[in-house]
Image (cartoon, rainbow, N blue to C red):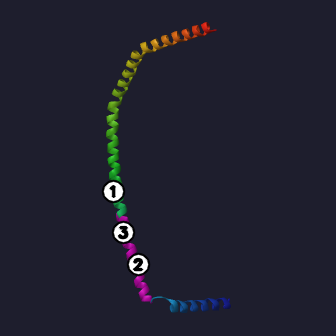
Amino acid sequence: MAKFSKGVLFGSLLGGVLGLLYAPKSGKDLRQQFSSDMNQSKENMVNALDTSAQNVDEMQRSLTDLNESLSKFNEVARDLLPDIATEAKETIETFKFQSSPRIKEIKKTTEQLTQHLNEFKQNKS
């Protein structure tokens, strides 16, 4: 255990001496730079938080506007959809009424053409 303690003590002393010899700046300069870096980091964090708070406020306003727009759209749709559905049904019924005679005429013509074609085939044979 005594060897281990001597090794720790020697390593600590050697590390301290080498740190002092190879340190690029004095302790005072390092503390000042560290303090300056910490203040800059603090300012950056405060700015980031302010920007985030502004973005959150803007997002909340946008969501409120979207919610109001959707509510108005819902009201308009609720009022107009029954009328649109009624008009669509009426248009479909009118189309059916108007197309019914045409469809009958097309069927009649198709039957006649089929009959003529069959007669032609029989005459040709």
Residue 36, placed above or below residue 28: above
Name the amino acid type tagged 3.
Val
Q: CA distance from mark 3 to mark 2?
A: 14 Å
Name the amino acid type tagged 1.
Asp
SS for callout 2:
helix
SS for callout 3:
helix
72 lies left or right of 106 = left
Question: Considering only order in the chain, which callout, 2 or 3, is on the residue closer to the N terminus?
Answer: 2
Name the amino acid type tagged 2.
Asp
Residue 119 got which mark? none
SS for callout 1:
helix
Residue 57 got which mark? 1
Is 38 part of what is drawn in magenta?
Answer: yes
Determine which residue is flagged by label 2. 37
Frontmost residue, 88 versus 108: 108
Q: Can you tell which quarter of the image residue 68 is in? A: top left
Question: Considering only order in the chain, which callout, 1 or 2, is on the residue closer to the N terminus?
Answer: 2
19 lies left or right of 78 = right
x and y percentages locating residue 106 in the rendered image: 47, 14
Residue 34, placed above or below residue 77: below
Q: Which residues are magenta?
A: 26-50
Mark 1 vs 3: CB contact within 8 A: no
Circle 2 residues within 10 Å: few <14, some 14–19, many ≥20: few
Circle 1 residues within 10 Å: few <14, some 14–19, many ≥20: few
Residue 75, placed above or below residue 107: below
Determine which residue is flagged by label 3. 46
Question: Considering only order in the chain, which callout, 3 or 1, is on the residue closer to the N terminus?
Answer: 3
Frontmost residue, 46 versus 94: 94
